Image (cartoon, helix red, strand yellow):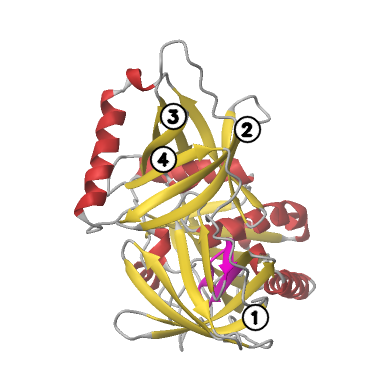
Amino acid sequence: MRKPIFLLLLICAGAGASRAQTVNEYEAELAQGQAAATPKGATFSALGSWRGVFHTSPGVEVPFNFEVRTGRDGATELFFRNAGESFEGGRIRQTADSLFVSLDQFDNELAFRIKDGALSGVLRRQDKTGQPLAVTAEKGPGYRFKETGTPPARDLSGTYDITFTSANGKEERSVGIFRQQGARLTATFLHITGDSRYLEGVVEGDSFRLSSFIGSGPSFYTGSFTPDGRLTGEIIGVRGNQNFTGVPNAQAALPDPYKLTYLREGFTSFDFSFPDIDGNKVSLQDAKYRDKVVIVTIEGTWCPNCVDETTFLAPWYIANRSRGIEVISIQYERQTDSAFVRKVLTRMRDRYDIRYDQVVGGIADKQVVAASLPSLNTFLAFPTTIFIDRKGRVAKIHTGFSGPATGKYYQDFIKEFNEEVDALANK
């Protein structure tokens, strides 16, 4: 998955007193109800295009765009817009003075107070735990970042070798994919764990800004470049910042994702026994999976890269299961109590029409995954996909997932995925 600094942004602490005070004020207003905020007799419609801004720390604003429209069943729904993608956020509930958006995919919620046609409130978990994040929104503006009118110093389009450096000095290789049209910039960063999905922003002079939000946590990148295209930048997050550098390279690539995770010495097969949401134990030794090609994916409902894989895998399974192919997803979630697991897995199952088995592996922690699946040499990424032949032998293991935002890298994965399954199915 993409770097955790973004996936967990809304569960943050230590962002500064002024920010905490603002969040507390928003929370208090929402709790008390501010009927006077909307003048008597006035009407408010959320339908239309909006520009939102997260106030992550003093002086730092992370913009995002969304649209509110009437869904197919007549309900009012919010859709996040990032670099051409329209991502379904959730249904809207409106009262006289407040507006609530249930971001069920990530078990979060946007809670707004309505005042003078604008919105102010917080992004928070649905169970109200963790530290909320202040957010405001205004209707109408079609832009994301406010532009100064300074023309771009160059076109950044292309691929880059990127190096991210953490606060402790640890370096991580990545591939940056930039596409620029005029001052508009879209991008994504590929890591061995997955990609940063759809980033959108602007180039002005010799600097650029990028952001994204689909309901988990906001992403914000800022940087500058030299005349020859060398990049220097920073990820700005509530949990801390991270620097990166980059150089243009048309052949930029990551290590082979099929060689990072493998079976430990002494193991010849992969197996598990985990409960489904009804408590029934599921294992690869069950009759349902014998003599079948089986795809096992290790994921979590909270993980954006896992959402991308599920978006591909759910319809793929429906089209291919008659060939003697099965899929199982092992879920590692933020909580493991039965009510929470049933809620989040059922939501995902209904949203993506998942018809393969889902089982619960444990809490969403890489060390927990590694301990619960001892036949694997390591665990690096949500999702990780395991290909198993008809005799129960592991054929390949793919670490991470390059989603549709990565373009050619995504198409290459789909091609390799189908070729591998075809080879196993035809044996």
x 58%, y 66%: residue:
150
Residue 192 counted in the magenta span: yes
Disc 3 is placed on an element classified as: strand
- Between 34 and 262, the one lying in front of the other is 34
Amino acid type for the residue under numbered disc 1: Thr
* Camera-side mark, 4 or 2: 2
Task: Read off the magenta span.
Answer: 187-204
Few, some or many residues within 10 Å of mark 4 (<14, 14–19, 20+): many
Task: Give the x, y percent position of residue 256.
Answer: 60, 85
Q: Which mark is residue 109?
A: 4
As measured in the structure, the alpha-carbon distance from the residue carrying label 4 to the one carrying label 1 is 35 Å
Q: Position of residue 402 (x, y in %)?
A: 61, 70
Question: Is residue 175 among what the camera can see?
Answer: yes
Asked which secondary structure carries label 4, the reply is strand
Query: Along the line of sight, which residue is nearer the eye, 21 or 362?
Result: 21
As helix, strand or loop, the secondary structure at mark 2 comes to strand
- Per the model, the C-alpha gap separating discs 2 and 3 is 14 Å
State which tag comes first along the sequence, 1 or 2.
Answer: 2
Three-letter code, disc 3:
Leu
Image point (51%, 51%), residue name: 64
Residue nearest the observer in this picture, 217 or 37? 37
| Outermost right residue | 426
Q: Residue at x 29, y 83 (%)?
A: 168
Q: For mark 1, what is the residue?
A: 159
Mark 1, secondary structure of its residue: strand
Q: Is residue 388 left or right of residue 345?
A: right
Q: CA distance from mark 1 to mark 2?
A: 36 Å
Residue to which mark 2 is pinned: 69
Residues at discs 1 and 2 in contact (Cβ within 8 Å): no
Which residue is nearer to you in this view: 336 or 300?
300
